[in-house]
Image: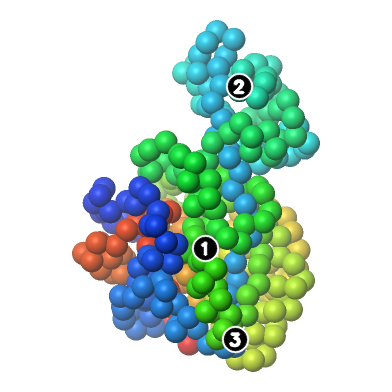
């Protein structure tokens, strides 16, 4: 398949620039992947779409204040965008400057000097390895800024430190939020719990590569960026119990779907951790996920391809066209979808 097979035109004004006052106040477009049927609802209606035997799986990664500005000794501006910590004071990062970056460059920041060690490991792609003056995550958390996606055309404010973070966030390490979970608040979770629906968590630290566009026309030639994940034994046990009770495993976000499917790459779901480069495209046979809650994704993106693999490309693009006509809000701070697979109830 070609990259252009996943293109759609989106009016700029539909890209949500700020979150709604209440997390669960967003809209929810329901797509039946079996029939292509659509229904316009609100996210607060989610409990009525769930059954007591179902299992909701959340990503408990926590977004780090990953964007940091600095300057060269010459005065030139440098932007440091954290990708991941690889040691107490070592990290991989994207570096942007007006002139070429070189090893041993010193970048002056509000928190002290950051040294460019050199190119990161080959597996890291175009990243640089840097050395920070203090423990990596603590350093960025104190001196960095919330890394809002590039399509949000404003400077991150104090409110974003709370709203660009899910209420389940626990394990620091992501540079972008698992946005499907941003719609959940304490009241909604209490209503879901009251229906007897069970909850479980995995961890997948979203990397900056999630915003990188495909640079090839043939999607089979694309190599996914690596992201760290951990699937605990408690999650495996919860999935087993859900299956025995006849319930559905519901991934809250594409990050959860990738982690679950990565952990089941051998044929069955097993606990474990590591890096995943799993690229899910149409034709992929899902082993774990029965239903998906997700935001709307960028045209020609790997995330749109994952959703298309789950519910069918034509059905998904038709749903997006409907969402545009109905003026849904798109992307990280936008509205959401509830999607059931064509091969599952």
Within 10 Å of disc 2 (Cα), the crowding (few <14, some 14-19, many 20+) is some
- The residue depicted at 56 percent of the width and 21 percent of the height is 70
x and y percentages locating residue 32 in the rendered image:
38, 80
Q: Is residue 48 left or right of residue 275?
A: left
Q: CA separation, marks 1 and 2? A: 33 Å
Q: Quadrant of residue 5?
A: bottom left
Q: Is residue 104 above or below residue 161?
A: above
Q: Which residue is mark 3?
A: 196
Q: Earlier in the sequence, mark 3 or mark 1?
A: 1
Label of residue 109 in the image: 2
Q: Earlier in the sequence, mark 1 or mark 2?
A: 2
Q: Is residue 285 visible?
A: no
The secondary structure type at the circle numbered 1 is: helix
How many marks are shown on the rendered structure?
Answer: 3
Q: Are marks 3 and 2 in contact (CB under 8 Å)?
A: no
x and y percentages locating residue 81 in the rendered image:
56, 34
The colour mode here is rainbow
x and y percentages locating residue 264 in the rendered image:
67, 70
Task: Work out whether residue 96 or residue 161 is closer to the camera in this orientation and state it.
Answer: 161
Residue most extreme to the bottom: 245
Q: Earlier in the sequence, mark 3 or mark 2?
A: 2
Q: Which residue is mark 1?
A: 181
The secondary structure type at the circle numbered 2 is: strand
Q: Is residue 209 left or right of residue 198?
A: left
């Amino acid at each position: 398949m070609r990259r252009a097979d996943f293109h759609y035109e989106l009016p700029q004004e539909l890209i949500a620039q700020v979150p709604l006052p209440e997390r669960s106040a967003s809209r929810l477009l329901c797509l039946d992947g079996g029939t292509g049927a659509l229904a316009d609802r609100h996210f607060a209606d989610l409990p009525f779409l769930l059954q007591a035997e179902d299992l909701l799986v959340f990503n408990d990664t926590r977004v780090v204040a990953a964007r940091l500005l600095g300057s060269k000794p010459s005065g030139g501006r440098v932007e440091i965008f954290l990708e991941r910590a690889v040691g107490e004071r070592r990290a991989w990062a994207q570096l942007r400057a007006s002139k070429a970056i070189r090893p041993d460059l010193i970048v002056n920041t509000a928190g002290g000097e950051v040294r460019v060690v050199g190119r990161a490991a080959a597996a890291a792609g175009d990243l640089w390895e840097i050395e920070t003056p203090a423990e990596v995550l603590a350093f960025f958390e104190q001196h960095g800024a919330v890394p809002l996606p590039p399509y949000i055309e404003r400077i991150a404010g104090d409110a974003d430190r709370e709203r660009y973070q899910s209420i389940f966030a626990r394990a620091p390490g992501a540079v972008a939020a698992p946005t499907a979970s941003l719609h959940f608040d304490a009241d909604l979770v209490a209503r879901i719990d009251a229906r007897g629906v069970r909850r479980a968590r995995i961890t997948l630290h979203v990397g900056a590569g999630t915003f990188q566009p495909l640079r090839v026309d043939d999607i089979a030639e694309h190599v996914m960026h690596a992201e760290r994940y951990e699937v605990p034994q408690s999650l495996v046990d919860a999935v087993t119990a859900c299956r025995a009770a006849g319930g559905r495993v519901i991934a809250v976000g594409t990050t959860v779907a990738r982690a679950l499917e990565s952990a089941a790459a051998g044929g069955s779901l097993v606990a474990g951790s590591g890096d995943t480069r799993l690229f899910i495209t149409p034709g992929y046979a899902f082993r774990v996920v029965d239903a998906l809650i997700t935001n709307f994704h960028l045209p020609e993106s790997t995330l749109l391809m994952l959703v298309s693999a789950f519910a069918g490309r034509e059905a998904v693009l038709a749903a997006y066209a409907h969402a545009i006509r109905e003026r849904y809000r798109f992307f990280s701070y936008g509205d959401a979808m509830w999607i059931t697979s064509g091969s599952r109830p």
